Amino acid sequence: MPYLAKILLYPVKSLDGVEVENATVLASGALKSDREFAIFDDSQNFVNGKRHAKIHLLRAQFTLFNRTISLQIPGDDAQQIFHLDEERKALEAALSDFFEFAVKLQQNSLTGFPDDLNSPGPTVISTATLTEVASWFPDVSVNEMRRRIRANIEIGDVPPFWEDQLFSAESETVSFRVGDVHFFGVQPCKRCVVPTRNPDSGLAYQSFQKTFVQQRQATLPSWVAASRFRHFYSLSVNTRLPISAVGKTLQIGNEVQIIS
């Protein structure tokens, strides 16, 4: 029986995630506290993994209830703890020192800062998919692959690439439920440079994208709507949520059911 096995939120875009037992749906369809904050430079460009491999060197732990971030900066002996609301200026100063240019931490508590503005719901993947994809790369563990892919919700008790049922060949959405929360599966998630890098060091894995594309195409289930893949460097599913989902809660253990 497919079920919700993990929920991962990323309170600051491009920094480490936090695993939670439950998450609330916002009016935008995003999950509360996911990508609520993002780092920007003076030109209003994202300071993220796509643009700055150095960001992988930062380690962050979050206490969502207390609204704090514990930041471990390379070269510092101890973690620095900041309140995300009350000590934002101090946090910005620490991050600016690390990047060696001025940055600002901006907040959007209504929609967060999703990569896909048209499908801002949680990204969906299965544990079996992460296990399969990790097996393509010697010395990459399942958890490391999880940190490379950075999906929000993980489905258990299903075969690899089960989530590829959640989009259709006709560019129509696929309806499914997680507990009592209704989702629309939209499309496979196109990947950027971030999964090619070690999430701790930022070092690129040689030929990662080439190997990924070859293996993804070779292992694509026969029933998958292959026409939806502009390229095979894609993994997990982008989603939208209807207004009826607002305020509802996803809970670990929720049953997952495709309804159309």
Image (tube, rainbow, N blue to C red):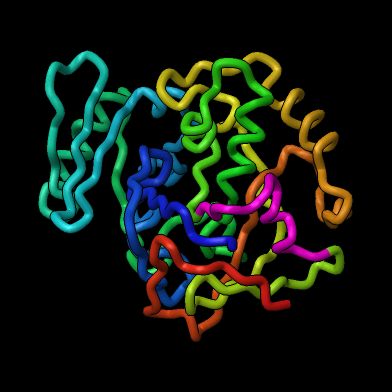
Q: Give how far across and how far down residue 25 sits, in percent.
A: 41, 71
226 or 82, which is in the foreground?
Answer: 226
Residue 124 lies left or right of residue 246; in this view the side is right
Q: Quadrant of the C terminus?
A: bottom right
Residue occupying the point 55% across, 77% down: 182
Q: Is residue 221 magenta?
A: no
Q: Is residue 165 magenta?
A: yes
Give the number of callouts. 0
Displayed quadrant of residue 95: top left
Residue occupying the point 78% across, 30% down: 215
Q: Give how far across and how far down residue 125 sits, in percent.
A: 59, 51
125 or 189, which is in the foreground?
Answer: 125
117 or 57, which is in the foreground?
Answer: 57
What are the residue bounds of the magenta stretch? 154-168
Residue sitting at the far bottom: 244
Q: In which quarter of the image is the N terminus?
A: bottom right
Residue occupying the point 58% across, 61% down: 2
